[in-house]
Image (cartoon, grey):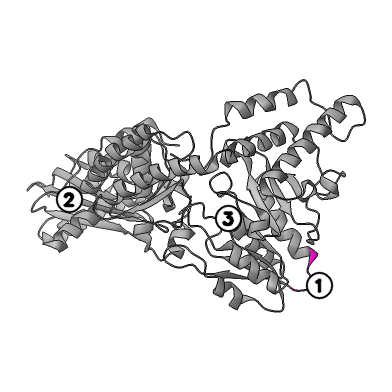
Amino acid sequence: MYSDKVLDHFSNPRNVGEIENADGVGTVGNAKCGDIMRMYLKVDDNGVITDVKFKTFGCGAAIATSSMATEMVKGKTLKEALTLTNAAVAEALDGLPPVKMHCSLLAEEAVKAAVEDYMKKHPEAVI
Amino acid sequence: MDNAATTAVSPAVLEKMLPYFTECYGNASSIHGTGRDARRALEESRRKVAGVLNCKPQEIYFTSGGTESDNWAIKGTAFANRKKGNHIITSAIEHHAVLHTCQWLEKQGFTVTYVPVDEYGQVNPQDVKAAITDQTILISIMAANNEIGTLQPIREIARIAHAHKIPFHTDAVQAIGAIPVDVQEIGCDMLSLSAHKFHGPKGVGALYIRQGTRVDTFMHGGAQERGKRATTENLAGIVGLAEALTLAVDHLEEKSARIAALRDQLIDGLTAIPHVRLNGHRTNRLPNNCNVSIRFVEGEALLLRLDLAGIAASSGSACTSGSLDPSHVLLAIGLPHEIAHGSLRFSLSDNTTQEEVDYVLKTLPDIVTTLRSMSPLYTDFLEAQK
């Protein structure tokens, strides 16, 4: 049911872990539904995401979409990161089963939550 | 390690079945020689099954599997007794073949009591007794739970049912071939079984109906199965079911003891991993069932990692059921959602080896460590411990 790319990102997830003193952290989802994603961002003075890490409690698709989303926003500006859509994450993984599309939405929301957290901590920043 | 889902057809069973596809392909309803050969094989199979269950051959009806047997027993009893009453008693942890059938009957004007279970998944017979009304026309409680393996006090429940002149059905799909099942000793009026759970073929099962039990015809058509279940008999399947059942109960005690020893190693080994709990009763459970909840990780992720390591298991996680809710059985025993999501079931069979159990015990701890290292729930838990 999963594409090879999903299985690859599930079994060898990129950017797993935490960032100490991260500039932005976003957590979405809840344990009751079986998915929690947390994204950590390191952002430089130019508003570029220089490092991103994630931790995810969830199914194979949740872990794979987290991994893919981190790859897609790394090196991008915050503005670019905010344009990330769940459809783009799913497409980059060569598709997801319909019942798993909500996982890609969670990945999009996790990135946005981390950027929002950054904005809150850095009100001076302009996107 | 997923033998509760299904089992491999044993070579001896397949060998018995094969002639009934080609040489002896007759219709058991035909008058001619080929038909008579088919009829002989059909009735011989019925005798074998009746012998194992300790009932009369004419009390065995072949079906397409456990789900049909459950549907027939429940709907057939409900509609045959509609004038007597409209109330059915079952448990909260039945298989969906029973639960969804009961829910459908509720839409047809029947009322259903779903008795709860304790933390080990055991039905209390007194709860069943207390639920009985003058409208109760059927009690259906499974012999053993398919997810957590808990054995139910069906003998006591059968006695309570009979004391109130109510027929008692048991779904014994998981129990048959794992523990001794004798319909006289249990005292049930109906019992469902499915061949593919004990190394028989898929698509064939049976329903035992005690003589004198009022059950409506399920499939309308020809006169097969004493006019109760029409359709040309799946003879190869039925021969396979009878052979598989005969083999399953042969030396059952020895086989079960060996499997239970492997199960205990799994239970002890897996619950030795921190924050892992056993689901179901420690001893009052099927000899082949081990079900654990692994905190801070999700079941489907565990299954995928195990699959990549060559191990097949199953989970009660929502992600494996296609719904947002985890298994109704795990919720019924009181597990919070997040712990129910991290459940794993290993179900053994006669083919399971010591090496396979050792391999699971060697492989799973590393998978748990890896997934926990990625889990924000585990991070938060460790933070809270500080």
Residue type at numbered disc 1: Lys
**Point 41% across, 52% down: residue:** B317
Q: Amino acid at mark 2?
A: Tyr
Q: Residue at x 66, y 51 (%)?
A: B192
**Count of all numbered marks drawn on residues in the image:** 3
Which quadrant would residue B91 be assigned to in this image?
Answer: bottom right
Disc 2: host chain: A
Q: Which residues are magenta?
A: B80-85
Q: Position of residue A101 (x, y in %)?
A: 41, 47
Label 1 element class: loop
Tag 3 residue? B96
Check the residue under mark 3 and report the chain it is in.
B
Residue count near mark 3 (Cα–Cα under 10 Å), binned few <14, some 14–19, many ≥20: few
Please give the residue where the numbered disc 1 appears in the rendered image.
B83
Q: CA distance from mark 2 to mark 3?
A: 42 Å
**Label 2 belongs to which residue?**
A40
Residue type at tag 3: His
Image quadrant assignment for residue B278: bottom left
Between the C-alphas of marks 1 and 2, the distance is 66 Å
B52 to B277, vertically: above or below: above
Q: Quadrant of the N terminus of chain B?
A: top left
Instruction: Check chain identity for marks 1 and 3: say if they share one.
Output: yes
Query: Residue B90: x and y, percent?
Result: 60, 66
